[in-house]
Image (cartoon, rainbow, N blue to C red):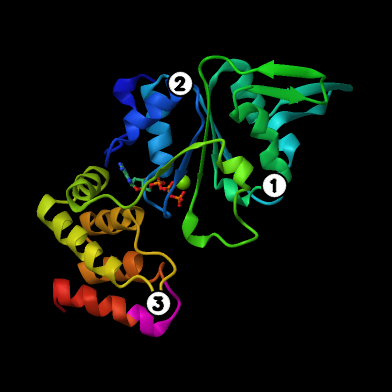
Amino acid sequence: MSAAEAPYYEPVGHERELFEYAFHRKLPLLLKGPTGCGKTRFVSHMAARLGLPLQTVACHDDLTASDLTGRYLLQGGETVWTDGPLTRAVRHGGLCYLDEVVEARKDVTVVMHPLTDDRRVLPLDRTGETLEAPEDFMMVASYNPGYQHVLKSLKPSTRQRFVALELDFPPPEQELAIVVHESDLARERARALVNLAVRLRELKGQDLEEAVSTRLLVYCARLMQAGMPVLQACRATLVEPLSDDADVREGLMETIRATFGG
Ligand SMILES: Nc1ncnc2c1ncn2[C@@H]1O[C@H](COP(=O)(O)OP(=O)(O)OP(=O)(O)O)[C@@H](O)[C@H]1O
Ligand SMILES: [Mg+2]
């Protein structure tokens, strides 16, 4: 994919520049931010802009070091070494993106320690190789600090190997551009939705774990663009996914009715 056909990404600050500096100076990058704020889109956009292949690993607590590095697999009676996504990126160059990295166990995250400091190597105990990362290898990781708790946090020795960047929901003008681009909803209707999101996000706190995301705004706009009545679309995307608590949902609906009437 060339830079011209990179997945659409609306920059909010200087995040693209930071990413490019980090890539050129061979530094790993950690992205923090709430769900649906554009972390995954940003990484695929930057991979395309820089012309790099992208290996994405969704981390979870059953992920093993071999899931990242590779394993011997039986193939027609022979055991053949098969690279995992991390090893593939180190061997051939490109971005390795560890999504929700806090979900990975600490013994798994240490596998990337020698890769994310100035050694930039990946020792493979099983094959006896030590791979040196090429110029165009870059490690990117992301997580949502919102639902972090003591058991799920990164070791300081892991996090302090990364340059870090916090992403958040975009300011209204950028969010409007995103919603219009992703839904084709008429600009003025999209603007009302984005203004509503600002108000709904102010309600965040006591009862809501996370505020309404840009992703959900895009969902809402798509349903409205398809012809769904606005209150129904809002309930299905900006209320129900956020909470199971009847009072909380009613509070959100009140704000929505105050915006759109009804
Ligand atoms: N800056 C942006 N530019 C373009 N689209 C965006 C942007 N921010 C959010 N979006 C839209 O929001 C959707 C959700 O973004 P994305 O999947 O990247 O979120 P995320 O931060 O990776 O969330 P999660 O933590 O849940 O994985 C995208 O599919 C896209 O439609
Ligand atoms: Mg994501």
Residue 248 is inside the magenta segment: yes
Side of 153 relative to 210 (left or right): right
Task: Indicate which disc residue 106 carries.
Answer: 1
Q: Earlier in the sequence, mark 2 or mark 1?
A: 2
Task: Indicate which disc residue 206 carries.
Answer: 3
Q: Position of residue 59 (x, y in %)?
A: 61, 45
Residue at x-position 70% and y-position 35%: 111
Give the residue type at disc 1.
Lys
Residue tagged 2: 25
Task: Identify whether 169 is placed above or below 116.
Answer: below
Q: Which residues are magenta?
A: 243-249
Q: Earlier in the sequence, mark 3 or mark 2?
A: 2
Task: Identify whether 132 is placed above or below 224.
Answer: above
Give neighbour class at mark 2: few <14, some 14-19, many 20+ (Cα, 10 Å): few
Which type of secondary structure does the marked residue at label 3 adopt? loop
Residue at x-position 48% and y-position 53%: 144
Give the residue type at disc 2.
Arg
Give the Cα distance between marks 2 and 1.
Answer: 26 Å
Q: Position of residue 12 (x, y in %)?
A: 27, 42
Give the Cα distance between marks 1 and 3.
Answer: 31 Å
Question: Between tags 3 and 2, which lies in front?
Answer: 2
Front one among 36 and 116: 116
Q: Position of residue 231 (x, y in %)?
A: 23, 71
